[in-house]
Image (cartoon, coloured by chain):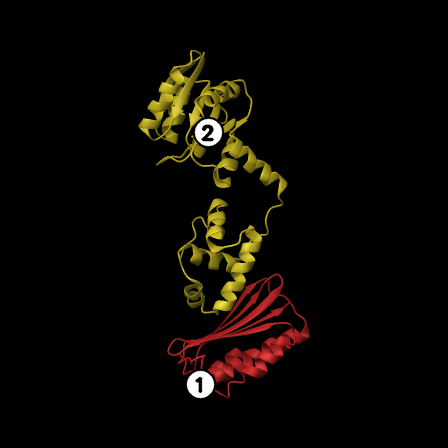
Amino acid sequence: MASGWSKYNGVPVSVTLTGAVRETHPEVEVALLRTAQEALANVAKHASASRVGLTLSYMEDVVTLDVRDDGVGFDLARPSDGFGLPAMRHRVHRLSGALFVESEPGVGTAISARVPA
Amino acid sequence: MIRLVIVDDHPVVRDGLRGMLSAATDFEVVGEAASGDEAVAVVTALSPDVVLMDLRMPGSDGLSAIERLRTHPCRVLVLTTYDTDRDVLPAIKAGATGYLLKDTPRDELQRAIRAAHSGEAVLSPAVATRLLGQVRQPASEALSARELDVLALVAKGSTNRAVAAALFISEATVKTHLLHVYAKLGVSDRAAAVAVAYERGLLRGRGR
């Protein structure tokens, strides 16, 4: 998925797996996949990034998915429409997870989903 | 008469010990050394009964000297400032008869030398406590490679924000990694995590 996106958008995506990679519940996998897709779609639409990092971190009790870019970022105090953040948040919350959005104009954006594994 | 060799890289410490021990009538300081290599040479030449060995010395350290003196009949009593796991266990494994800290009072030091001479193990209370803790506690869960990456950056003074930038992930995930590190090391903040990690040698030789 990441390589297809990368080819299409012309922005290199580095995928990193950390921890003991293992199979998780299908619902968890689907939620993380959708979150990754939407986060990458946001990067393509808004970020003007030159670099994207997709990191899956397997820990004892949780898995986190981070999509970080070095693009234009945005002001968290003035959330704009069209980022699909509410839908992402809803999906992660349904699995007792949490979604974090970190961004700063000029510095880039990081979207992080943390779900129990 | 118990014949002693004092090994320490600081002349002031050697002089102090020599003075302190000469007061007792049953001790004779027959030699001194300022490094591990020198210690091996002096002990081989003079065949003392007990060696007072500092661990951390420039050049050749005390640990390697203890290992090389393993087959020598002398007893080695470690006398050092450090009571960390990283120092204590290797020294005892290498063959030290005892392990004392430099804040040991004069009387106790003299008693310890006599005990070591007769082959008894002697440990400073702080060292004994540490060893008991090691036996009692199951080895703490190992940190993952990524947790060590995060901790190494924190040890260099990086903020969560800087760690996140270096690893190109979110600060939220850096915090999650740190919480796991705290739980595994049994600490509650980053300073303690770094201290424990150094103490256990987890961060030795790391760096980027």
Chain B: what color? yellow
Does residue A77 sit above or below B23 in this rendering?
Answer: below
Closest to the observer, B152 or B159: B159
Does residue B171 sit above or below B88 in this rendering?
Answer: below
Question: x and y percent of residue A5 in the render?
Answer: 50, 82
Q: Quadrant of the C terminus of chain B?
A: bottom left
Q: Is residue A115 visible?
A: yes
Q: Secondary structure at mark 1?
A: helix
Q: Secondary structure at mark 2?
A: strand
Does residue A100 sit above or below B92 in this rendering?
Answer: below
The residue under the point 57% across, 80% down is: A88
Q: Which mark is residue B113?
A: none
User: Badge 2 local density, few (<14 within 10 Å), some, or many (20+)?
Assistant: many
Q: CA distance from mark 2 to mark 1?
A: 64 Å
In the displayed structure image, the side of residue B158 where residue A57 appears, left or right: right
Q: Which mark is residue B78?
A: 2
Q: Which mark is residue A46?
A: 1
The residue under the point 51% across, 21% down is: B116
Q: Quadrant of the N terminus of chain B?
A: top left
Q: Look at the numbered discs 2 and 1 and tell me whether their residues touch, using CB distance below 8 Å.
A: no
Question: x and y percent of residue A58 in the render?
Answer: 58, 65
Q: Is residue B202 visible?
A: no
Residue B17: which quarter of the image? top left
